[in-house]
Amino acid sequence: MRYKVLTVDDSKTVRIIVKKAFKSFDCEILEAGNGVEGLAVAAKEMPDLILLDVTMPVMDGVEMLTKLKSDSALKGIPVIMLTAEGGRDNVLKIAKIGVRDYLVKPFKEEVLVEKCGRVIDLKPLSDAPSKTKSIFDPADILVVEDKPAIVQQIQDGLKHTPWKVRGASTQGEAIDACSKSPPDVVVVSLSLPEESAFTLFRLIRTNVKTKYTPVFALVVKTETTQQQQAQTLGFTSIITKPIDAGELESKIAKAMNLDTSQRYYAMEQDCLVMRLPENCSPAVLAEVANYLKPKFTEAVDAGFSKIVIDIHQIRSLHMGVIKLLMQAMQTCRDLALNFGLVGNPHIISECKGFEDTRSWTFYESIEEAKSSVGKSSSAQLAGVS
């Protein structure tokens, strides 16, 4: 839902400051220069929040507030009053008319956003709404854990990524870190003393800057009660100790909605190369399969006519891999794409032992496949066995 915020102030400068403060949030800013204009805009647009200056010409904020609260259609709209330092007491006196909060001018943008975030659900806009972030883009991961060895373990497990992993050992350090530089993901150890992990989670969710930040609970696998408590409270996901770095990376990527296709697919020269990694776990295979048809279709749209399927890194063949490869080949046929397989001697030998794969043939290298696929009518299953 996109919220509407109406700012009623005779100062154009203040209205510009308000607009600037909300530019990174999914909300529409409406403006009015006095109470008369403000009432008209409020009646027409029905804003979700009104920022109302006290001192204005034509109709001041107190009169507009009074009229708002006497109108059955408008009285439910929450109002935050804006006033100069000298008008603080006056605002407190009129609070009984019905204001949600007040701000003293001059105010900081972050204070304005924080107060408004308590009234409406401010959702940050994506920095690039039309472009999905890639698994290879930098990200900031905050690990809240009082055991340095665990923080180091996560740093080591994710060192192959472009992500920066920083640690905080206490709730206070974590809050300070989130305020200074909001992270992309927070990992919180549930073993922090006095259940401060759960308190920290609630604070993260009430801060407008981190309200939508993915928060993972880090917990010992056997601590099922803590895991249930975290799930009930609304943690994004559970990471169990001992930590599986691959699982952690996958969950972070999923929580951040990252495009992970570049791990497996790449446009090279005049063809699309699909590469399977050494570890083809069920999660990896599902991820590759999820991108398969869109990537093959994208290749066709880009004018490519051939696919190279590289499985030379795989150590052992199993039915999950076979099913994925058969799906890839069928997709190529459906899209009239030429394709070729690249494998290692062990995989080539294993293929001879399966009825579904014994007729498969392979190129010895990606370079050979790139240069040979599509040059003959038999290229769709051509190669060097």
Image (cartoon, helix red, strand yellow):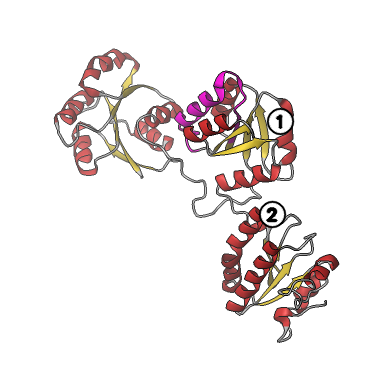
Q: Position of residue 98 (x, y in %)?
A: 23, 23
Return the mark for residue 281.
Answer: 2
Instruction: Judge the density around disc 1: few (<14), some (14-19), many (≥20) Cα neighbours within 10 Å.
Output: some
Q: Is residue 85 visible?
A: yes
The image shows residue 283, relative to residue 385, as above or below, that is: above
Return the mark for residue 298.
Answer: none
- The residue under label 1 is 150
The image shows residue 7, relative to residue 249, as above or below, that is: above
Using the image as rendered, state which of residue 48 and residue 346 is in the foreground.
346
Left or right position of 342 against 331: right
- Secondary structure type for disc 1: helix
Using the image as rendered, state which of residue 34 and residue 308 is in the foreground.
308
Left or right position of 242 against 27: right
* CA distance for labels 1 and 2: 25 Å
Q: Verify CB contact (< 8 Å) between mark 1 and mark 2.
A: no
The residue lying furthest to the bottom in this view is 377
Left or right position of 126 against 10: right
47 falls in the magenta region: no
Q: Residue at (74%, 28%) from the top-left corner?
A: 149
Quadrant where the N terminus sits is: top left
Q: Residue at (66%, 50%) from the top-left corner?
A: 136
Q: Amino acid at mark 1?
A: Ile
Q: Which residues are magenta?
A: 186-212
